[in-house]
Image: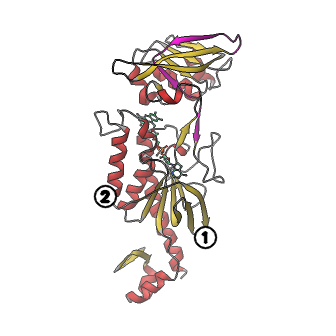
Amino acid sequence: MVCVVRGYPKFRIPAAAARIHTNRKSLYSLCMAREKPSKDVIVIGGGAAGLTAGQYCARAGLSVLVVEELALGGQALNIEGIENYPGFPEPVSGFKFAEKLETQAKKFGAEFLYTSVQSLKKEENVFTVTTGKGVFTAWAVILATGAKHRLLCIPGEKELTGRGVSYCAACDGPFFKNRKILVVGGGDAACDEAMFLSKLTDKLIVIHRRGRFRAQKALADRVLKNPRIEVRFNTVLEEIRGRANEKGIEKVAAGVLRRTDTGERREEEIDAVFVFTGSVPQTRLAPDISKDEGGCIITDAQMRTSLPGLFCAGDVRSTPFRQLVVAAGEGAVAAHAAARYIDEVLDTVYSSA
Ligand SMILES: Cc1cc2nc3c(=O)[nH]c(=O)nc-3n(C[C@H](O)[C@H](O)[C@H](O)COP(=O)(O)OP(=O)(O)OC[C@H]3O[C@@H](n4cnc5c(N)ncnc54)[C@H](O)[C@@H]3O)c2cc1C
C-alpha cells in the first residue's frame, strides 16, 4: 500500500516506510533521497490515444506531459465529419473532436508540449525523453505516435485527400453510397475494405498491380466472387484528377489507369479512390520493442510492451481495428496500467531507501 505525505501530495511512499518515518520532515527527506523524475508519465503523441491517455493519467492524480509534434488531434484532423464516434449522433469535424479531447485533458491537469520527441531511453526505473524543447524524465511512457498510411505518391493524391481520396472505408465509405469507387490494393485490408464498400455501391472497381491478390485466399475468393465488385489485375493508378463542384470545391472526378502488362493507359470517371496499400506505424522511438510482421508494437491486454514501464496505444499498436474509439479506449487502458505500474515502482524504490 502507498501513502501520500501530507503537505507533499506529489510524494507517495509505501505504507511500511511511512510507519517508520513518522514525522513529516523525515518522510520528506526519505522521498528526496531518490531523484524524482520530472513527470510521472510522458505521453508521446497527441492523437485520440494520446489525448485520452493524458486525460486519464491526470484524472488519476498523476503528473503527465503530452508531447505532440504537429497538431493535437493527429489523423482525426483529416476527417471532415466523424459519424461513428459513440455519443456524437451528429457528424462532428475532426478539428472540433480534437478540441474537445484537448479541453477535457487540460481540465484535469494534463500539460502539453508542442515539439517532436527525438529519442527515448530507460535507465534503471526512469525514462529519459529527449525533445526539441529539452529533456524530461518519467517513471512511465505511453507511446501513442499513430501510423501513417502508405501513400501512392501520385499526382492529385495529396490535393484531393478528404475530397474523394480516402484511406478508411468505415470512415468515408458512407459518403459515397451508390457512387463509383476505385479501390487500390491487393492485401487483406484492400479485400476487407472492398467487401465493406460493396454493401454501399455496386459500382466498385478493385485494382491491383500484380496478377493475383496478396490477401488470404478466403478473403480474396470472396472479393472475386462478389458480383458487385469488378477486379482488374495488373493495373495501377497513375494520377487522380479533380473537378470543381457547384460550390467551387475540387473533388475527385477521374483516375488515370495503366495496365502493367500491355502498357495501355486510359482515363476513367470515378467519384472516390480508397487506397489500401499498407500503413506505416510510427515506431522510430522504440526500435528494440517486440513488433508484429507489419511492424506494429505488440502489447498485452493492458497495453504493456516488452519493456516494463513503456505502454503503447492506438494505431501504432498491433491492433485489429484502427478507429478513434479503439485508440481512445486503448489510451484509457494504458493510463490505468501506467498508474498501477508506477505504484509498484514506487514501492520498490522507497522500500529499498
Ligand atoms: C482520412 C481518415 C479518415 C478517418 N476517419 C475515421 C472515422 O470516421 N472514424 C474513426 O473512428 N476513425 C477514422 N480514421 C482512423 C482514426 O483517425 C485513427 O484510428 C486514429 O486517429 C488513431 O489515433 P492515434 O492517437 O492512435 O494516432 P494518430 O491520430 O496518428 O496520432 C498520433 C500523433 O502522434 C504524433 N507524433 C508522432 N510521432 C511523434 C513524435 N516523435 N513526437 C511527438 N509527436 C509525435 C503525430 O503528430 C500525431 O498527432 C480515419 C483516418 C483517416 C486517415
In this orientation, which residue lies closer to the viewer: 235 or 201?
Answer: 235
Residue receiving disc 1:
124
Work out whether 81 lies above or below 131: above
Residue drawn where x is 59% and y is 33% of the image: 278
Q: Is residue 166 visible?
A: no
Residue drawn where x is 61% and y is 53% of the image: 286
Label 2–label 1 contact, CB within 8 A: no
Hey, what amino acid is under mark 1? Glu
Residue drawn where x is 54% and y is 42% of the image: 147
Q: Is residue 254 left or right of residue 200?
A: right
- How many numbered marks does the figure carry? 2
Residue drawn where x is 35% and y is 38% of the image: 85
Foreground tag (2 vs 1):
2
Work out whether 51 lies above or below 83: below
Dot 2: what SS?
Answer: helix
Disc 1: residue Cβ within 8 A of ligand 1's nearest atom:
no
Residue receiving disc 2:
107
Where in the figure is residue 76, as x and y percent of width and height? 42, 40
Dot 1: what SS?
Answer: loop
In this orientation, which residue lies closer to the viewer: 168 or 103?
Answer: 103
Q: Which mark is first along the chain, 1 or 2?
A: 2
Q: Magenta span covers which residues?
A: 260-280
Q: Is residue 43 visible?
A: yes
Where in the figure is residue 223, as x and y percent of width and height? 55, 18
In magenta segment, residue 184: no
Q: Quadrant of residue 20?
A: bottom left
Disc 2: residue Cβ within 8 A of ligand 1's nearest atom:
no
